[in-house]
């Protein structure tokens, strides 16, 4: 038996051709499937981590971050920047993130590019080993940051083959294990992955929401100045935290809002006692139907007041449910910073940042509620509004972080609705 490699570079050399890999230049489903199966048979020398899917497909590689074991839904994200914001996005609760861009970790980490203090994602999968950071803003190495946050990861696998698997068969459940000694029980990992129930029916907003109301402080970031205090507040907005990203709250503050954040479980009475000029429904993880068990009644009461309401991501789905529409789990979710969306009113196309695995069913929209935005990838519903009322929402992330800023105008649309009230 070959001696285990002692360094990352040695391990990379010894494992070449032995991890799961698709044949170069052959994109056929049969070729990908054959190589996936071939990769499960032997553990390459130097392997210190494995990702095992519920069907037994095994990806060997090198462990990153925390020496730990985790289980969740395996998804992929196509963004080429912003991995720290992605890892700290609460909407990734319950998920192991595969990055399709190969150079993850090359700009290190810093205390500014975070969307919540503690990551909700369960692990990460990358193609190349993490290199030393090369960026003037870097404060720490990604590997060290992952250890600090108790996040395990795996490097050195064929992320193209894994992405193809997800694209063709849907997001699987998987167990990821990093053991520095390399002693990994594949059968136990497969059993754990197979037993994990999946995101459908899961209310994960309770896991990532705040525990009590608080007032948000701080506007958006600019080079050389960092985060500013934001302009003087002109409107009082209550943001319902289903797993809110910080940059959403920053954008609301930058648009001139005093933002009071309340837990996902807040009742309409809890929200209205803050005397809001408008109510914002945030992004978040999990199945909207599960979270809707307690969130929908509160939103329905808010809608009856005539207050302006703006929803994003999970907040968009909760709003749709409150209006009488339905949601479903997608075979392939939208996760990346390059998703084209068409504004059906103006005909303009926005390049958007997205992260969702559930979608509002267009045919279920009730009378008086219309589709406003459509995905140019699959035609799915990306936005809605209530005719004659100051109520609208979008499935994507206009705050970006990471991603383009084509959709920042939506925050100003919310401001306009409050001004007209």
Image (cartoon, rainbow, N blue to C red):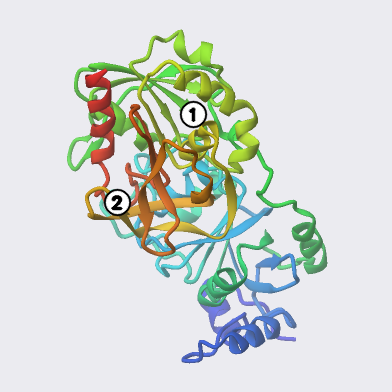
Residue 9 place in picture, x, y as percent:
50, 76
Q: Quadrant of residue 292?
A: top right
Tell me which residue sits at (60%, 53%) in the image. 329
- The structure residue drawn at horizontal position 71% and vertical position 68%, both measured from the top left corner, is 182
Whole-percent x, y for residue 164 in the image? 54, 75
96 displayed left or right of 174: left
Sequence-wise first label, 2 or 1 = 1
> Mark 2–mark 1 contact, CB under 8 Å?
no
The answer to whether residue 400 is above or below residue 189 is above
Which sits in the foreground, 104 or 31? Answer: 31
Q: Mark 2 or 1, which is nearer the eye?
A: 2
Q: CA distance from mark 2 to mark 1?
A: 29 Å
Across and down, in percent, residue 368 comes to 42, 35
Task: Assign the N terminus to one quadrant of the image.
Answer: bottom right
Neighbour class for label 2 at 10 Å: few (<14), some, many (≥20)? few
| Quadrant assignment, res 178 | bottom right
Q: Is residue 312 visible?
A: yes
**Can residue 178 be seen?**
no
On residue 344, which mark appears? 2
Disc marking residue 241: 1
Q: Is residue 1 left or right of residue 355?
A: right
Quadrant that contains the C terminus: top left
**132 up-or-down from 21: above or below:** above
Instruction: Report which quarter residue 205 is drawn in.
Output: top right
Nearest the viewer among 39 and 205 is: 205
User: Helix or strand or loop: what does disc 1 sit on?
Assistant: strand
Q: Viewed as shown, does residue 391 lie left or right of 71?
A: left
């Amino acid at each position: 038996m070959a001696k285990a490699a002692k360094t990352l570079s040695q391990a990379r050399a010894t494992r070449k051709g032995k991890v799961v890999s698709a044949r170069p230049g052959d994109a056929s489903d049969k070729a990908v499937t054959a190589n996936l199966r071939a990769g499960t048979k032997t553990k390459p020398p130097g392997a210190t981590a494995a990702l095992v899917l519920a069907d037994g497909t095994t990806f060997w590689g090198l462990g990153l971050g925390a020496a730990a074991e985790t289980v969740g839904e395996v998804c992929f994200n196509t963004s080429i920047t912003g991995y720290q914001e992605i890892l700290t996005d609460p909407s990734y609760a319950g998920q192991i993130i595969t990055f399709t861009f190969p150079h993850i970790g090359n700009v290190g980490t810093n205390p500014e590019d975070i969307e919540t203090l503690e990551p909700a994602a369960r692990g990460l999968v990358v193609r190349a080993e993490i290199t030393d950071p090369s960026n003037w803003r870097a404060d720490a190495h990604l590997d060290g940051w992952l250890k600090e946050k108790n996040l395990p990861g795996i490097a050195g696998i064929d992320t193209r083959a894994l992405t193809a698997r997800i694209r063709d068969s849907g997001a699987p459940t998987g167990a990821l294990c990093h053991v520095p000694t390399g002693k990994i029980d594949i059968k136990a990992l497969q059993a754990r992955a197979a037993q994990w129930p999946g995101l459908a029916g899961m209310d994960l907003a309770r896991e990532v929401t705040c525990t009590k109301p608080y007032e948000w402080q701080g506007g958006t970031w600019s080079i050389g100045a960092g985060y500013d205090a934001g302009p003087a507040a002109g409107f009082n907005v209550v943001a319902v935290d289903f797993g809110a990203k910080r940059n959403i709250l920053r954008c609301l503050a930058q648009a001139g809002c005093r933002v009071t954040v309340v837990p996902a479980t807040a009742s309409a009475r809890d929200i209205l006692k803050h005397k809001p000029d408008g109510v914002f429904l945030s992004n978040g993880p999990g199945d909207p139907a599960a979270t809707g068990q307690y969130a929908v009644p509160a939103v329905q009461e808010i809608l009856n007041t005539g207050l302006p309401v703006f929803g994003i991501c999970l907040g968009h789905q909760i709003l749709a449910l409150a209006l009488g529409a339905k949601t479903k789990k997608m075979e392939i979710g939208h996760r990346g910073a390059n998703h084209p969306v068409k504004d059906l009113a103006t005909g303009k196309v926005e390049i958007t940042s997205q992260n969702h695995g559930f979608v509002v069913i267009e045919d279920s929209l009730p009378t008086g509620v219309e589709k406003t935005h459509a995905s140019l990838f699959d035609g799915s519903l990306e936005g809605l509004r209530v005719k004659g009322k100051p109520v609208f929402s979008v499935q994507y992330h206009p705050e970006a972080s990471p991603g383009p800023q084509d959709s920042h105008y939506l925050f100003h649309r919310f401001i306009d609705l409050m001004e007209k009230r």
